[in-house]
Image: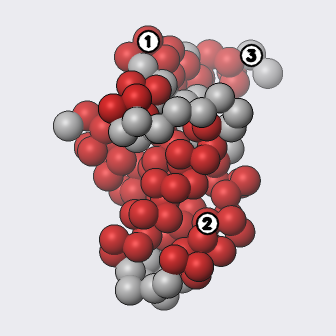
């Protein structure tokens, strides 16, 4: 349940922050889906083991890309090639955008670190 809620909250954050045009620009949707798959834990090692997907080299990136494409296909009536093209166009910048967490919260420990960083964000900037 935590993964699903986090996934949807990433979409809500994108909607408020980036003024996403959900219905006319598939690239906006692709970026939000990449971010949601990356930050929600959809591609955690445990989930991938349960899905029987294993890989060592760039496994997390490939999982995020595949999950984003599947999500786009679930909500839009477009071809797989169009979805793949949209994800490829936005992947690099959207994959590296970790807001509002500041990092990928792979597990509860990393989520706590992200929360601690959020709480201390003003301390850092006030010393500059």
**Residue indicated by mark 2:** 87
Mark 2 or 3 closer to N-term? 2
Q: Which residue is painted at 36% across and 56% down in the image?
A: 12
Q: Residue 15: give x, y in percent of width and height.
A: 43, 63
Q: Which residue is painted at 43% across and 70% down in the image?
A: 72
Left or right: where 40 falls relative to 103? left
Q: Residue furthest left?
A: 1
Question: Quarter-wise, where is residue 94 in the image?
Answer: bottom right
Residue 16 seen anywhere in this rendered image of the structure: no
As helix, strand or loop, the secondary structure at mark 2 comes to: helix
Q: What's the CA distance linking mark 2 and mark 3? A: 39 Å
Question: Quarter-wise, where is residue 124 in the image?
Answer: top right
**Residue indicated by mark 3:** 127
Q: What's the CA distance linking mark 1 and mark 2? A: 29 Å
**Residue indicated by mark 1:** 109
Q: Residue 70: give x, y in percent of width and height.
A: 42, 63
Q: Residue 96: give x, y in percent of width and height.
A: 68, 44
Mark 1 or 3 closer to N-term? 1
Q: What's the CA distance linking mark 1 and mark 3? A: 27 Å
Q: Nearer the viewer, mark 2 or mark 3?
A: 2
Q: Nearer the viewer, residue 9 or 91?
A: 91
Mark 1 residue crowding within 10 angstroms, few (<14) / some (14–19) / many (20+)? few
Q: Residue 112: give x, y in percent of width and height.
A: 42, 15
Mark 2 residue crowding within 10 angstroms, few (<14) / some (14–19) / many (20+)? many
Q: Residue furthest right?
A: 128
**What colour scheme has been applied to the protein in the rendered image?**
secondary structure
């Amino acid at each position: 349940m935590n993964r699903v809620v986090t996934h949807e909250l990433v979409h809500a954050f994108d909607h408020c922050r980036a003024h996403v045009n959900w219905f006319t620009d598939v690239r906006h949707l692709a970026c939000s889906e990449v971010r949601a798959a990356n930050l929600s834990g959809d591609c955690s090692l445990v989930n991938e083991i349960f899905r029987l997907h294993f890989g060592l080299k760039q496994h997390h990136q490939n999982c995020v890309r595949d999950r984003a494409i599947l999500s786009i296909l679930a909500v839009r009536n477009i071809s797989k090639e169009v979805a793949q093209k949209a994800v490829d166009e936005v992947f690099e910048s959207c994959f590296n955008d970790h807001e509002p967490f500041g990092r990928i919260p792979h597990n509860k420990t990393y989520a706590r670190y992200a929360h601690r960083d959020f709480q201390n964000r003003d301390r850092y900037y006030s010393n500059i």
